[in-house]
Amino acid sequence: MRVLPLVSRLEEVMASLCLAGMVVTISLQVFNRYVMGSSLYWSEELGRYLFIWAVYIGCAYATQHEKHFGVELITRFAPARVSRFTRTVSDLISLAFCLIATWWSIDMLQFLAMTGQKAPALGVSIIWVYLCVPIGFGLTSIRLMSRLTRWRRDFSTPLPSESKV
């Protein structure tokens, strides 16, 4: 499991670089449009693609740190066993979705490879844009499996209210 901290750091750096690149690109576009009187034809597209990459990579990072939005009514106010159960079921459903989305997005990449589509303004293969989908969902799947493994281990230890004195 020494690989996961490295992957976590890579996720953090990649998402941050994508966001920083997006801010610089859009700021440059605003400067050119309003100060210089001309616009950069490629900046909006690049900014959008960097944002998409930041979202998919950041999703895996947020999963690791349990920062996704969720309805916490049951997990906060229910007994510990019920809370554990609902979090586990929620993660299993999320894992199933992420695995299916990863599989589907790989099929989509294969289709795009056959079409040879290019991004209109940047002129690069559209595969580079859509590559973030299987990477993001794949990394999120790994994070969910890691969390489920940890919770399974924790689930086998009795709660303080369950221990016999």
Image (tube, rainbow, N blue to C red):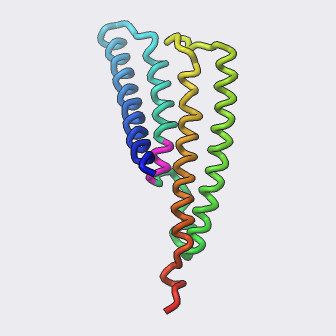
Residue 119 percent location from the top left of the image: 55, 14
Residue that appears at 46% across and 40% down: 58
Q: Is residue 114 left or right of residue 142?
A: right
- 130 vs 31: above or below: below
Q: Identify the residue at image location x=46%, y=30%.
A: 51
Q: Is residue 107 above or below residue 137?
A: above
Q: Is residue 31 left or right of residue 11?
A: left
Q: Nearer the viewer, residue 122 or 27?
A: 122
Q: Position of residue 50 (x, y in %)?
A: 45, 27
> For the magenta stretch, what is the residue range?
59-65
Q: Position of residue 76 (x, y in %)?
A: 51, 69
Residue at the extreme front: 2
Whether the magenta-drawn stretch holds residue 14 is answered as: no
Relative depth, front residue between 154 and 78? 154
Horizontal side of 38 relative to 161 (left or right) equals left
* Image height of 13 relative to 127, above or below: below
Q: Residue at x 52, y 49 (%)?
A: 143
Q: Position of residue 161 (x, y in %)?
A: 51, 84
Nearer-the-camera pick, 23 or 141:
141
Q: Magenta stretch containing residue 64, yes or no?
A: yes
Q: Residue at x 54, y 24 (%)?
A: 129
Instruction: Determine the main secondary structure of the stretch shown in magenta.
Output: helix
